[in-house]
């Protein structure tokens, strides 16, 4: 016997933010590994120049919550001077 749509519980809907994150154009493409390799330099560049832009990093951070949280945490830590 196979499941029919009536037999299965409804799947949770994605939030608008989750859908937007999935649809972000992340070209030029950058993997999470590459992002983490570049994270320190990127954050240091942002501290030196708040207008610093790195298209690959910016696009990746817009579409990857884990890397964005890491970058934000590192930036906050360096700004607080508690190293």
Image (cartoon, grey):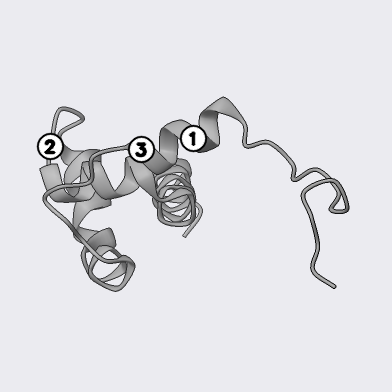
Per the model, the C-alpha gap separating discs 1 and 2 is 25 Å
Cβ atoms at labels 3 and 1 below 8 Å apart: yes
Residue at image position (34%, 40%) is: 62
Q: Nearer the viewer, mark 3 or mark 2?
A: 3
Q: Is residue 46 above or below residue 51?
A: below
For mark 1, give the secondary structure.
Answer: helix
Per the model, the C-alpha gap separating discs 3 and 1 is 6 Å
Look at mark 3 in the image and give the residue it sits on.
23
For mark 2, give the secondary structure.
Answer: loop
Residue at image position (85%, 73%) is: 1
Indicate which disc residue 40 carries: none
Per the model, the C-alpha gap separating discs 3 and 2 is 21 Å
Look at mark 2 in the image and give the residue it sits on.
53
Crowding at dot 1, Cα within 10 Å, few <14 / some 14-19 / many 20+, comes out as few
For mark 3, give the secondary structure.
Answer: helix
Left or right: 40 in relation to 71? left
């Amino acid at each position: 016997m196979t499941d029919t749509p009536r037999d299965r519980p409804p799947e949770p809907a994605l939030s608008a933010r989750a859908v937007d994150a999935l649809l972000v154009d992340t070209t030029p493409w950058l993997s999470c590994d590459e992002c983490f390799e570049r994270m320190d330099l990127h954050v240091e560049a942002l501290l030196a120049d708040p207008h610093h832009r790195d298209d690959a990093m910016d696009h990746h951070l817009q579409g990857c919550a884990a890397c964005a949280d890491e970058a934000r945490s590192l930036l906050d830590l360096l700004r607080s001077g508690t190293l």
